[in-house]
Amino acid sequence: MSRAPTRRALLGGLASLLATPLWANAPSTSLRPIPRPGSVAARAPGTPDALLEAANLGGAVSFAVAELGTGRILEASEPQLGLPPASVAKAVTALYALDLLGADHRFQTMVVVNGPIVDGVLTGDLALVGGGDPTLNTDGMASLVAKLAAHGIKRVDGRFVVYGGALPYVEAIDPGQPKHVGYATSVSGICLNFNRVYFDWKKVNGDFETAMEARSEKHRPKVRVARIALSDRKAPVFSYENSDGIDRWTVSRHALNKEGGRWLPTRQPEVYAGEVFRELAKTQGITMPPPVKTTSRPTGEVVAILESARLEEILRGMLRYSTNITAEMVGLAATKARGVYAASLRASGREMEAWASETLGITAAKFVDHSGLGDQSRIRADELAKALAILAQKSRVHPILKGFTMKDAKGRPVKNHPIAVRAKTGTLNFVSGLGGYMKTASGEELAFAIFAADTDLRDSLTRAQRERPQGARSWNSRAKKLQQALIERWGALYAS
């Protein structure tokens, strides 16, 4: 009597050579792959059940590996279960932005004047106009100021206004994150240094000297819109409040070593960018009043423009470093190009859902944002694997995906591993994902998606626990080992 396949191991790899339609549903019954000549399947590392049991993750695990081109699911486990994608969502966001904006799109930050310039004096307003560039930094702002100086302006007699309305203002990408983490900052149409301020400290004569700076490689202008004070409490390390339009932080002096620094998020992106612009203008001999935020798009003569790199290069950096604010800003810009001005990340996420259904065949996804930071987003492994298997999508996203390093049993990188992988990782506490492409030693290419999540355990965390919760590091380590074990299995199972 043969043993029935388990529920967790939904295995494909049919003997039939008939290709299934690309968007056909995954099999509703378990199918085991027929071994290739030489019993390759029998030699493939582990079985899905054994690998899942060894990972001991709890919660839920879903994966699918698909044939490139046809999208035929070759092997899967719980493929129709929607799980949080974490930063794997950025791969979808990249495709969304490339489709709506184009690989050659460049974001522009402009300086606009609406009055006459006589003998270097502007009688009217000067405006700093954000164009949604997520990569603008202090060095770039200095370049923009230099262009303004070359135009001959020495003094502004009107107002200095800053406009960030090209994209909606969002106070925090995920309000459930600790307030001091730099990856959950605010979003606006103007973004300087990923909307973060550098907190620097040094112990001098028994006490700490602190500074809040818009630090870059060449410049360190001080900022006033973000301030920090020392506290004698031991916990929490940081506290935050917005008072009179100023980010007011306190930090426990007990948590500081002799010297150091870290990035803190800013919730006042327009005023922050304006302050830095004004300070840099002083070094060029230009005087202007303090910046004020405007909600009306300024009109007038454009006197200076700073262009970003091409969108494709921006996305390459986003996928490599997993920058959340870049994902949110390019996602919002893509939604705007779709003809919709979304008032929130969730509203823009709905537009990306509709686009993914129309373009990729991903019909069951939920995106609460574009970065994957929000843990209420959901995606199915089979739908993502099939979408990545489309050759047109591979040609767009594969070149900008980061190479995935295969490791040995001791966690050491393996040079010249026979399996080549380019993929996007995703990590939240008790959530881990990986989606992308692999090439076997014999050259076969496959698309895959792997998701694991213990949502009950994650939901039990308080906001304070979310930065370094107990057990999360070992859980995520086991999840990553499972990902590699599955890739190694597929590398052996589907090599010719």
Image (cartoon, helix red, strand yellow):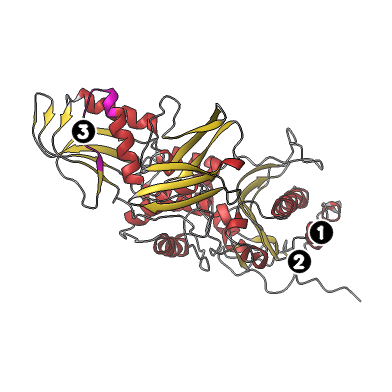
Comparing 170 with 37, the one in front is 170
Point 73% across, 50% down: residue: 477
At numbered mark 2, what does the secondary structure look like: helix, strand or loop? Answer: loop
Q: Quadrant of the N terminus?
A: bottom right
Q: Are marks 1 and 3 in contact (CB under 8 Å)?
A: no
Point 12% across, 28% down: residue: 121
Image location (x, y in percent) of residue 49: 80, 63
User: Which mark sits nearer the N-terminus, 3 or 2?
Assistant: 2
Point 78% across, 57% down: residue: 55
Measured in 3D between alpha carbons, the distance from the residue under mark 1 to the one under mark 3, in whole angstroms, is 68 Å
Q: Are marks 1 and 2 in contact (CB under 8 Å)?
A: yes
Few, some or many residues within 10 Å of mark 2 (<14, 14–19, 20+): many
Q: Is residue 113 magenta?
A: no
* Residue 282 visible in image: yes
Q: Which mark is residue 288?
A: 3
Point 73% across, 33% down: residue: 416
